[in-house]
Amino acid sequence: MPHTSSVPLPWRLKKHRYGLVGTTCNYCHSVYFPPRFFCPVCQKKDGIKERKLTGSGEILSFTTINAAPKGFENQTPYTIAAIKLDDGPIITAQIVETPKKISIGKQVSTVFRKIHEDGHAGLITYGLKFKINK
Ligand SMILES: [Zn+2]
């Protein structure tokens, strides 16, 4: 019978989401974010270990959102970018600067910011966004 953790999923993923913790493979040194517990390159899972990512990278592409989904209306316009992390993985995340200041090739690093506010329940979600390096 496979081992299953009794800790709820959002709680287990908290470290990964807030701390930018990915995984790396001891055999081929591939780095994964979000974390993977099986290496698709080596077809192995016994070499996977956690790795804290540097949180810095470069903007590969970006798009500015003017029509936001429910709950994000008061944040428009905001920009979502594909970021190639220095560690290797490419992730998508929000850039905190105004769209005018954002361009491809800019170096960015993580900041901890409010992601979403549920006005009705007063629930505020925090997470990582990126800012342009000065
Ligand atoms: Zn591997």
Image (cartoon, rainbow, N blue to C red):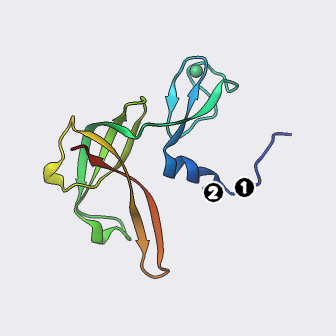
Q: Is mark 2 within 8 Å of ligand 1?
A: no
Q: Residue tagged by mark 1?
A: 7
Task: State the image coordinates of residue 42 (x, y, percent, origin top left).
Answer: 60, 18
Mark 1: which amino acid? Val
Mark 2: which amino acid? Trp
The front one of 76 and 14 is 14
Which residue is farthest bottom? 120
Task: State the image coordinates of residue 87 (x, y, percent, origin top left).
Answer: 43, 30
Q: Is residue 125 left or right of residue 45?
A: left
Q: Residue tagged by mark 2?
A: 11
* Circles 1 and 2: CB atoms closer than 8 Å: yes
Q: Quadrant of residue 25?
A: top right
Q: Residue at x 76, y 49 (%)?
A: 5
Q: Quadrant of ligand 1?
A: top right
Q: Quadrant of residue 89?
A: top left
The front one of 126 and 82 is 126
Residue 85, placed above or below residue 26: below
Task: State the image coordinates of residue 105 (x, y, percent, origin top left).
Answer: 21, 34
Disc 1 to disc 2, C-alpha distance: 7 Å
Q: How many marks?
A: 2
Query: Please, what secondary structure does the residue beneath circle 2 have?
Result: helix
Q: Residues within 10 Å of mark 2 (few under 14, many from 20)?
A: few
Residue 104, placed above or below residue 27: below
Position of the N terminus, as image quadrant, is: top right
